[in-house]
Image: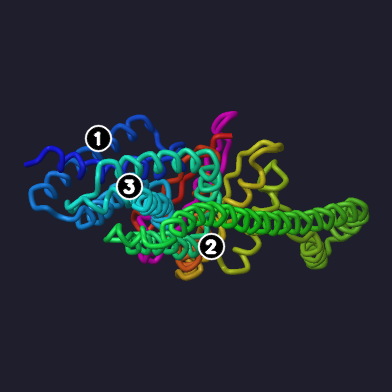
């Protein structure tokens, strides 16, 4: 075995290092032990690159024959490492974004070193070409981390619409395959007329188009999320307004009842004094109906109380019952909007699920309390019919199986507050538990 050829193959596979750095940069904050993960990734890439270089050297193979299976292997490992934190669509988007950038770097290195490659008879590219690729990859990685990582990170953490992610990752994957296919097999073609200059310009345009596309995706997604947030806040305000009108009605009826109470007492006293028992019973019955339903106070926090009142009435109209245990303070300034959205999503999904069951089973339990000054806990559980839709390692209710909004947005809130969300199914009970660090 020739050591020089082995080194050339190893350097060819070394393009995986900057690609791995670009894969980990957007999700580094999601990892519990980022340093350990980085060291493990470096060791794995080194071992796989060395093994692949050895195989290619012994059998004189084109490195691309092993590069694609190697990329598939690392994608599987990458997904398994992140499946509890982000979805398959997001994982694929980040992975193929890095692959796209490195494929352009590979193409650019072949273009820049085409004159030297022309006279090389070996299957593998020159060490100088691989070094140019590594330098180019390191530079692109630095620009990516300085400019685009914050956009991609925001998209991963805030943009939770899985029906979009399941499609958008195909774009960088398609361009990655395209750039791999258009890398010239004969470097001499690059040196013909103005092909060299045009190729360099096109590579530069590709980098610019990539960063512009990521920025455009980020801006559109941010505006979309902002509109959804405004719609959610308007809905919450409408619910609070409806609750306020209910309170006004209760207060007006209470005032009227207090005003009329003495008159009712006189009538009751007169009927009782004249032994008109049947008339007294009928009068008390009419008076009881006039009193109406007692107003239920669910929570000290006005916004959460409004949400609870809205969904409690909605559940009763659907023939379901909600058992509320809401122990929250009056003021929750920083987390109130997200908390209301989370409760609303979970309760709405739970009520939708139990309405498919027999009436005797239509009960939802909702617990939300401030565990400590810096932590809020939420538990929502409901019986289900034994059919749970699973996708990409996550659990989704029937209501959201096509949109990915619901539990996915709830998980994004948990991630936003550095908390955690667990979903359990046991004895036909579906339970979602959430901890939020406030």
- Please state which of the two labelled residues, at mark 1 or mark 2, is closer to the viewer: 1
Residue 17 coordinates in the image, percent (x, y): 32, 40
Q: Position of residue 105 (x, y in %)?
A: 39, 49
Displayed quadrant of residue 315: bottom right
Element assignment for label 3? helix
Q: Looking at the image, is mark 1 or mark 3 earlier in the sequence? A: 1
Q: Residue at x 50, y 41 (%)?
A: 143
The picture places residue 332, in percent across and down from the top left corner, at 68, 38
Which residue position is annotated with label 3?
A: 78
Q: Nearer the viewer, residue 351 or 283?
A: 351
Distance of mark 3 from mark 2, alpha carbons?
36 Å
Residue at 67%, 54% (x, y): give it: 226
Q: Nearer the viewer, mark 3 or mark 2?
A: 3
Label 1, label 3: how many angstroms apart (C-alpha)?
A: 14 Å
Residue range of the region highlighted in magenta in the rendering = 367-394
Q: Earlier in the sequence, mark 3 or mark 2?
A: 3
Q: In the depicted view, which residue is nearer to us: 345 or 306? A: 345
Q: Residues within 10 Å of mark 2 (few under 14, many from 20)?
A: many
Q: Which residue is mark 1?
A: 43
The 10 Å Cα crowd at callout 1, few under 14, some 14 to 19, many 20 or more, is: few
Residue that badge 2 annotates: 351
Q: Is residue 83 visible?
A: no
Please tell me which residue lies in front, 23 or 178: 178
Point out the tag, 1 or 2, that comes first from the N-terminus.
1
- Neighbour tally class for label 3: few under 14, some 14-19, many 20 plus, Cα within 10 Å: some
Nearest-to-viewer mark from 1 and 3: 1
């Amino acid at each position: 075995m020739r050591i020089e050829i082995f080194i050339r193959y190893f350097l060819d596979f070394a393009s995986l290092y900057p690609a791995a750095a670009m894969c980990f940069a957007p999700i580094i904050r999601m990892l519990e032990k980022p340093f350990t993960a980085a060291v493990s990734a470096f060791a794995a890439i080194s071992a796989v690159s060395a093994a692949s270089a050895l195989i290619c050297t012994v059998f004189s193979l084109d490195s691309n024959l092993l590069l694609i299976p190697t990329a598939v292997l690392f994608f599987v490992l990458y997904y398994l490492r992140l499946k509890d934190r982000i979805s398959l669509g997001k994982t694929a988007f980040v992975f193929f974004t890095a692959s796209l950038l490195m494929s352009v770097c590979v193409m650019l290195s072949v273009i820049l070193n085409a004159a030297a490659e022309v006279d090389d008879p070996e299957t593998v590219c020159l060490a100088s070409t691989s070094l140019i690729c590594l330098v180019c990859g390191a530079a692109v990685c630095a620009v990516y981390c300085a400019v685009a990582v914050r956009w991609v990170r925001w998209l991963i953490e805030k943009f939770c619409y899985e029906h979009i992610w399941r499609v958008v990752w195909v774009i960088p994957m398609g361009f990655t395959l395209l750039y791999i296919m258009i890398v010239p097999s004969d470097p001499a073609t690059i040196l013909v007329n103005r092909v060299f200059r045009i190729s360099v310009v096109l590579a530069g345009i590709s980098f610019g188009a990539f960063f512009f596309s990521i920025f455009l995706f980020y801006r559109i997604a941010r505006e979309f999320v902002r509109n959804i947030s405004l719609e959610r806040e308007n809905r919450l305000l409408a619910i609070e307004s409806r609750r306020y009108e209910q309170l006004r009605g209760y207060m007006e009826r209470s005032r009227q009842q207090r005003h009329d109470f003495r008159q009712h007492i006189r009538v009751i006293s007169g009927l009782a004094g004249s032994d008109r028992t049947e008339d007294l019973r009928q009068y008390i019955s009419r008076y009881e109906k006039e009193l109406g339903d007692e107003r239920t106070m669910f929570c000290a926090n006005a916004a959460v109380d409004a949400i609870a009142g809205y969904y409690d009435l909605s559940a009763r109209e659907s023939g379901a019952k909600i058992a509320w245990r809401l122990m929250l303070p009056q003021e929750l300034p920083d987390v109130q909007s997200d908390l209301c959205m989370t409760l609303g999503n979970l309760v709405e999904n739970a009520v939708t699920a139990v309405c498919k069951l027999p009436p005797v089973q239509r009960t939802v339990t909702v617990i939300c309390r401030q565990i400590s000054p810096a932590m809020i806990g939420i538990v929502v559980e409901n019986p289900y019919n034994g059919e749970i839709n699973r996708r990409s390692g996550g659990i989704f209710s029937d209501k959201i199986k096509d949109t990915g909004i619901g539990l996915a947005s709830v998980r994004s809130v948990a991630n936003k507050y550095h908390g955690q969300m667990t979903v359990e199914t046991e004895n036909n009970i579906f339970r979602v538990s959430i901890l939020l660090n406030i």
